Image (tube, rainbow, N blue to C red):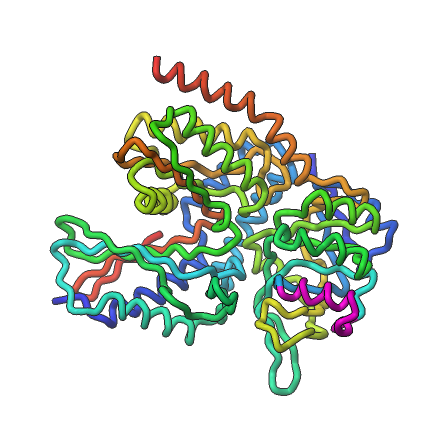
Amino acid sequence: MPITDDMIIEATGELYSRSLRKVPEDAKAALAAAMETESNETARQTLKLQLKSAEMSENKDTFVCSDSGVPVYFVKVGSKAELACDFKASIRKGYEVLVETIEPPLLKHVTNPITLERGYHGKDMPIVSYDFESGADYVEMVCSPKALGSGRWAALELFTFPTLEQIETYILDVAIKAGAQHCPPVLMGVGIGGTFDHCAGLAKKQTLRPIGEKNPDPVLAEMEARLTKAINGLGFGPMGTGGDTTVLGVHVDFSSGHGFTPVAVCFNCWINRRARVRIWGDGRMEWSE
Amino acid sequence: MSVTEHDLTLPLSQEAAQKLKLGDFVYLTGEIFATAGLPTHDRLLKCLEGAEPLPFDMSGSALFHLGSLNEEAEDGTLSIVYMNPTTSTRFNAHMPRLIPGLGLRATGGKGGLDATCARAMAESGCVYLSFLGGGAPIITAGIRKVTGIGWPEMISHYRIARIEVERLGPLTVGIDARGNSIYDRTSKASLEKRAAILEGMRAERDSFEA
C-alpha cells in the first residue's frame, strides 16, 4: 500500500504540534545532568526551572515557548517506500490545517522580510528539505521549528585551507558573540566543508542528532568534547545570567570540499524543539523525538 | 548556598529596587505592562515626542518584553492564553529613551540590555529582570487578570497588555538599579578568558594528535 496525501497532512501538523509541547527526553536528561555539575546557584535554580517548565507544558498540554517560530521540516524518502502523494502540496496543506485548528492558537510569526508584514503564511513556507534513504521502506519526517531567539545567532564564514585551530577559534568566537542571547544552555550544530549551501544544512542537521550520543568519528568526538568544555568555560550560563552550563553539547560533522572551506554554526535553545515520525504505506506512524 | 528571593509588590518603590542584587530571584505581585513588538517600541518613542497619547499612564511602572496571545471576547472580557519573554537586546536602541521617558522602575525580558541601557537604568533607578525563555507555563501561571489592551489594532504580541500578576516569577535580577549588569560582566569576562581557553584547546589538540 502506498503512502497517501492524508498521511503526510496528518504527520505535518502533528509533528509541529508535538515539537512545541514536549521537550525531548535527551534534552531533559542533559539539563538534569548539568544540574549535578553546575557550581553557580542561580544557574542551578534556572536549570531546575527549565525542567519544571518542560514538565508543566507536558501536563497542561500547552506550548513551552510562546514563539512557535517558522515551520521547518526535513524529509527522507526511503528507496523502497511506495508513494501516491503530492508531497510538497500535502506538507503545505498539513501546515494550513494546523494553523486553523491547533489549540492553543499560534502567534503570527511568519514574516515577509521585504515588508515586515507578519502572518501565518508566506512565500516558501513551510521550509522543507528533501533527501533519500537507500533501502528504507518508509518516509521519515522531522520538524524543527525555528524562531529569532536562537535562530539569529547562526553564522557562516568561508576559509581557505583552514587549520583545525582556525576552525575551532571561529566556533568559539561565534559562541562569544551569541553570549547570553539564545536561551542557553544550547545545543550547537557545526558543519565544516562542502559548499556554502551544503555546509549550512550540515550544521542544522547536527542539531537533530540525539544529545549525549558520542560521535562515531574519534577526531570529531574529541573536537566536540573540546569545544563543549571550552564554550562552557566562557561563563554565560543558563539564560545568560552566569554559570558553567552554556552548551548541552556541540555536534560536528564535515563534508569533503574544495580548498575554500565554509564553517557553519547554529544553535538550538534549551528546549531543542524536535519531533520525528516514520510513515509506512500500511498506515503505521512511528513517532519519536 | 541558596539564591536570595524577594516577594515584591508593584509599583516598585525606589528603595525596593535599590535593594535587589544581581542573581537574586524576584516574584512580582501587582500591575505590569507587556509587549514584544519592535513597532510598538517605535510607537512608544513617538508618543514621548508628542505624536499621540500613551495608551496607559506608565510612570513608575514595569514594562516587560513579553509576547502573549491575548484575546478580547465579544463581551469585552480580556484574557491571555500564554505569555513568554522575547529578546530584550532588540530594543537596545529604544530603552535608553523609554526608561527615563516613561519613568520605568523595572524592565525585563530575556538576554539583557546593553551598557548604554544599563547607564540609563542607573540614572532612573530601574532594574532589569530576566524571565525564563521557554517558560510560558510558569509565566502564564502568574497572571491574575488582564486589565487592558493598548493598541488592539496591532497583532497580538505587538499590543501592550496591562496585566495584574500574582507572584509572577521567579525572575532573575540581571541588571541592578545601579547599572551593574550580569550581561556586561559575563561578556567582558568571556573576552578576558578567550586567550587562556584557546591555549587550553591547543594543548588538548596537541596531546590528542600525539
Res. B48 visible in picture: yes
> Left or right of B146: which side holds B83?
left
Q: Position of residue A128 (x, y in %)?
A: 32, 59
Q: Residue at x 77, y 64 (%)?
A: B30
Q: Is residue B188 magenta?
A: no
Q: Position of residue B78 (x, y in %)?
A: 65, 77
Res. A213 visible in picture: no
Number of numbered discs visible in the structure rendering: 0
Q: Position of residue B200 (x, y in %)?
A: 50, 19
> Left or right of B45: which side holds B153?
left
Residue A245 vs residue B47, the one in the foreground: B47
Residue B29 vs residue A269, the one in the foreground: A269
Q: Residue at x 36, y 45 (%)?
A: A200
Q: Is residue A219 above or below residue B124?
A: above
> Left or right of A18: which side holds A50?
right
Q: Residue at x 23, y 71 (%)?
A: A5
Q: Residue furthest right?
A: B15
Q: What is the span of residues highlighted in magenta in the rendered image? A: B39-56
Q: Is residue B55 magenta?
A: yes
Q: Position of residue A240 (x, y in %)?
A: 60, 42
Q: Residue at x 45, y 52 (%)?
A: A23
Residue A283 vs residue B103, the one in the foreground: B103
Quadrant in which the N terminus of chain A appears: bottom left
Q: Residue furthest top?
A: B210
Residue B61 vs residue B116, the one in the foreground: B116
Q: Is residue A188 above or below residue A97?
A: above
Q: Is residue B161 above or below residue A198?
A: below
